[in-house]
Amino acid sequence: MGVIDDVIVVGAGVVGLTTAVRLAERGLRVRVWSRDPVTETTSAVAGALWWPYRIEPAERVGAWALASLRVYEELAAADPVATGVRLVPGVHADTVRDGLGAWAKEVDGLRQLAPEEVPGPYEVGLAGRLPLIDMPVHLAWLRGRLTALGGVVERRVVRDLAEAGSAVVVNCAGLGARELVPDGGMRAVRGQLVLVENPGVDTWFTAASGAAGASSETTYFFPQPGRLVLGGTAEEDAEVLEPVPATAASIVARCARVRPEIAGARVLGHRVGLRPAREGGVRLEARPLPGGGLLVHNYGHGGAGVTVAWGCAEEAARLATEH
């Protein structure tokens, strides 16, 4: 394939914008097409803590996640206010370092806790200082970075990837890939959050399951500027976008078992997002388009789009420019 200078990226969530930035940094003219405003994408709802959770394929995720971790560490050191990225201490309950992938050995400062150090009704925990991303701020920063590089974001509903008429199209449509590709392996995993006034919590906490046998329940809280984000749920094939009051009450109660002061915190709002999970995991590959063009797929990141965004973006940019 010859030299390209024009790329369409479909999707303006964290994966789409990060990919667009990496492409623009290579000197390409990049246009992002998005059905929704950047601030109303699924990514805008995310918690969002760096951690390779519920994402496949395992043999590729570690490298993507570690590449992203290094970028977030740089952004946190450079300007946490503008980028929305901070390094914050916290605990993953019910987690053993030796049970994680090889990537965990590359994460500085992970420490297995003694039982008496684990907060709440948990006996096992892993402590770490990890990137915590304020997604509305970070998405705005990504868009600003792209604009500074000459890229543009356009509101546009794409019904066929061939619409682009560009030499290279990068598909970062998330759950939209279900119809757009089409990909019958895409599944929505519903996440519900509660935003409350922060009663003084300055560390994050996660536990994969809220109760025995309740695999759709998770327990976590993330201190973000101006709010404490409480979660959550992981409900497969559930696509109700309205918050469920009983679910919200259960989320608050689970978090309060870890930090009792959360029980009385004033509720600021509720959020629901549909994670774009895919059977077989992330699809990141290039395919030829009729007429000599190239289609690069970069979707299916589930709830870990933030965690692998930069690593996947770098690979997608390489596929787009080296074919």
Image: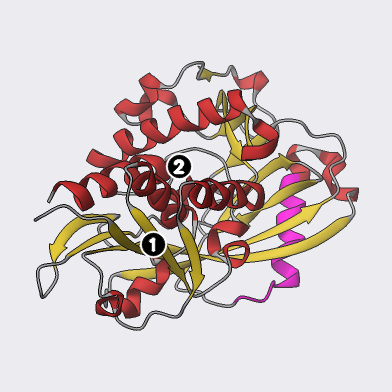
**Image quadrant of residue 26?**
top left
Secondary structure at numbered mark 2? helix
- Estimate the x, y position of residue 30 in percent, counting from the top left: 38, 58
Residue depicted at x 40% and y 73%: 176
Crowdedness of circle 1 by 10 Å Cα count: few (<14), some, many (20+)?
A: many
Secondary structure at numbered mark 1? strand
User: In the image, what residue type sits under mark 1?
Assistant: Ala
Q: In the rendered image, which residue does mark 1 sit on?
A: 277
42 relative position to 268: left or right: left
Crowdedness of circle 2 by 10 Å Cα count: few (<14), some, many (20+)?
A: many
Q: Nearer the viewer, residue 10 or 223?
A: 10
Please identify, in this view, whether the residue under mark 1 or under mark 2 is nearer the observer. 2
Residue depicted at x 37% and y 44%: 22
Q: Specify whether residue 54 is in view.
A: no
User: In the image, what residue type sits under mark 2?
Assistant: Thr
- Estimate the x, y position of residue 186 in percent, counting from the top left: 34, 69
- Estimate the x, y position of residue 218 in percent, counting from the top left: 58, 51
Where are the magenta residues, as a range?
Answer: 241-255
- Estimate the x, y position of residue 221 in percent, counting from the top left: 69, 43
Q: Is residue 314 magenta?
A: no
Q: In the rendered image, which residue does mark 2 sit on?
A: 307
How far is the residue under mark 1 from the one under mark 2? 14 Å
Q: Quadrant of the N terminus?
A: bottom left
288 relative position to 109: left or right: left
Residue depicted at x 33% and y 80%: 179
265 relative position to 38: left or right: right
